[in-house]
Amino acid sequence: MTVFKAYDVRAVYPEPLNEETARKIGLATGRLLLAESEEQGAIVVGHDMRPSSPSLVEALKEGILSSGADVIDVGLVDTPFIAFAVNYLGAIGGIQTTASHNPIQYNGFKICRAKAKPVGMGTGLEKIEEMANDRDEPTIATVRGAETSVDLWEQYKGHVFTYLDPRIQSGEIVIKAAFDASNGMAGTMVPKLFRDVKGLELIEINFENDKGEFVHEPNPLVDSNLQQTIDAVKDCDCDLGICFDGDADRCMVVDEKGVIVGCDLITAWLAPKFLENEENGSIVFDLRSSHAVTNAIEHAGGSAVKSRVGHVFMKQAMAEHDAPFGGELSGHFYFRDNFYADSGAMAFASVVSAIAESDSPMSSQIAPYKTYCQSGEINFETPDKDAAMAMLVAAYPDANVDRLDGVTVDCGDWWCNVRASNTEPLLRLNLESSSDAEVSTRVAEVSNFLGTRVDH
């Protein structure tokens, strides 16, 4: 079965991912989570707006029920909703049927255990894969689980609004935002949570999510997918723009000038606000982030904690350090009061609340953190990733080298990180220095060790 990835289940529907596969995954997940809980319990199940999601989630539920676990169906929801529901209901786990930012013909499952702790390869997904791939039909529980359905949108709204400035909620302050739902689950989430907020004036883009198609790829990391957001910000004189991915757990932000703001700069900007009421608090960020993040955290009296790339590692670091906030370059933002999980809705609430705290526009608030120049992520194909990274390290014998995730080579006036992709057969380079000229020079230099550059 080729549907299992590093962090989740994801593949083209109906082959290799189909209803029979979904049933087996549901049965395997139910068995795993029941064994871990050592008692009868419920698994929260939700789904996104993809045409294949309704039939897949029904098959998934059939598998879970056959394992003896109960099912609580929360319906059509964004992925962060599942983390909330698992904790709110005290469930033994949760599964969202979604393929995130992938094209419409894809689908998949994001799985978590009790307290919304992620299930990935090395943390349980490999066991689910083994059971699902077993040619012998798994033993079905003698007592079938029970299914119920609940509507938790009001409870979810109250949870998210702990991050939304009360002055925005009351209408004392009004923020105008261009909001691109990317024809994904933000098109359901935003109307239920934010549309009626007195202090939010929303310019809604691509909110239709029942047509089975995307106007643009629901991946906000691709600059071209942000063009509608940029245009709306400029045309409608907005305070900011925000674009979500397909399952609404990631977002990218555009300032009032229509300039895309890197997620590491968002982390640097928000970090001091989350440290205001902390004593020796920590902020977690992925190691590809600008040194501006570390500088901002330490200047605010906090401890800067680097993490490996990926939500499994970010959530683990958040919990270990009891960090109130964390940010990843991919657009995931994590919150302690959200069970250390990521939330696109809370990220939006935090950003508009930060804008509301100052009379200055967002671009002026972000400007102090734009102290370095960056290459952005550049991909390379190479037949031997380890050898390529070894050559890079050998070329700079006086550099400080960190192997937390791939290799980070710090030469003082410039640094770079090179890591193997978890989802594609590529090496990914991020490089930073004090000037664009130096970045260009060093990228050309480092590229000699990394293989063939892939521009996409």
Image (cartoon, rainbow, N blue to C red):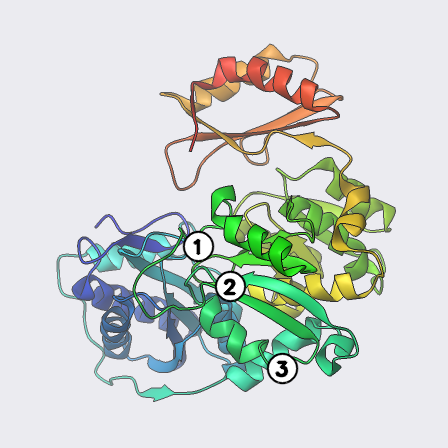
| Category of crowding for the residue at label 1, using alpha-carbon neighbours closer than 10 angstroms: few (below 14), some (14–19), many (at least 20) | some
Q: CA distance from mark 1 to mark 2?
A: 9 Å
| Category of crowding for the residue at label 2, using alpha-carbon neighbours closer than 10 angstroms: few (below 14), some (14–19), many (at least 20) | many
Front-most of residues 53 and 179: 179
Marks 3 and 1: CB-CB under 8 Å?
A: no
Q: Residue 15 placed where, x, y %?
A: 17, 54
Q: Residue 325 placed where, x, y %?
A: 69, 58
Whether residue 312 is visible, yes or no, is no
Judged from the image, the secondary structure of the residue bearing numbered disc 2 is loop
Q: Residue 332 placed where, x, y %?
A: 57, 54
Image quadrant of residue 130? Answer: bottom left
Q: What residue would you read off at disc 3? A: 158
Whether residue 344 is visible, yes or no, is yes
Up the image or down, 124 lies above or below 387; here it is: below
Please name the residue shown 65% across and 22% down the image. 439
Of all residues, the one furthest to the left in this rendering is 136
